[in-house]
Image: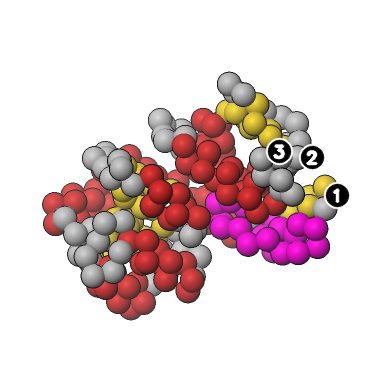
Amino acid sequence: MIKILVVDDEPNIREVVGRYLRREGYAVVPAADGEEALRLYRRERPGLVVLDLMLPKVSGIEVCRRIQAEDRIPLIMLTARGEEEDRILGLGLGADDYMVKPFSPRELVARVGAVLRRTGEAREANGSVLAFDDLRIDPNTREVTVRGELATLTAREFDLLYHLASHPKRVFTRDQLMEAVWGYTFAAETSTVTVHMRRLREKIEPDAADPRYLQTVWGVGYRFGG
């Protein structure tokens, strides 16, 4: 049984989210603050973390940073609408997704399942190495080399890059990328894709403002231009 660490300082959110997750067969480990979250994470070793960013004692961003420094565990953030910079920072630290409060517990459970499914498939997947001049993408080691140097990508950044690079010149909408890379077939916040694309460009493009590989097709979506 997969353990889900649910971290939120609001008791009703912990209770409702926990109830929905248990209905789907998950074991739930609740935590009310960042300090407790880190302690329970190290003791219970959950398969996924649902993490509120606004926490007492230790902030959600710091919890995310410490957890991802120890292990690339799947993580979904819960945020308020005014915390865009925190969302961007959290995604950059390796969080797989975020949901904005107020949110649907049923949608959260669906996202938990999608993230676990995608990360499980990624660990098992074997594929061909993709090479484009100064860019090399190896799905077996999940390493990306840019101009001979290893790039540090999060798990979801790698998945997005590999998917696009596997279909050069093909244009994908944000909804298509959400479904292919995040595994969502329902309405989702496609700004997640925009944030990941921006961070990927900063990591692999010689000039992020004039990208060679990760190109925007205005009014449609993105394509890999290698």
Q: Which residues are magenta?
A: 139-159
Left or right, 3 with reference to 89: left
Would residue 105 be found to the left or right of residue 15 on screen?
right
Q: Secondary structure at mark 1?
A: loop
Tell me the CA gap for discs 3 and 2: 14 Å
In the image, which is nearer the foreground, mark 3 or mark 2?
3
**In this rendering, does residue 54 appear at all?**
yes
Q: Which residue is situated farthest in the right direction here?
A: 133
Q: Amino acid at mark 1?
A: Asp
Query: Viewer-nearest of labels 3 and 1?
Result: 3
Which mark is first along the chain, 1 or 3?
A: 1
Is residue 145 highlighted in magenta?
yes
- Is residue 177 shown above or below 7? above
The one of 224 and 195 positioned closer to us in this rendering: 195
- Give me the residue at 26% from left, 57% from top: 54
Name the residue beneath numbered marker 3. Answer: 210
Task: Give the quarter of the figure containing the N terminus.
Answer: bottom left
The C terminus, quarter of image: top right
| Residue corresponding to mark 1 | 133
Residue drawn at x 86%, y 49% is 133
* 3 sits to left or right of 18: right
Q: How is the image coloured?
A: secondary structure
Task: Say if mark 1 contacts mark 2, CB within 8 Å.
Answer: yes
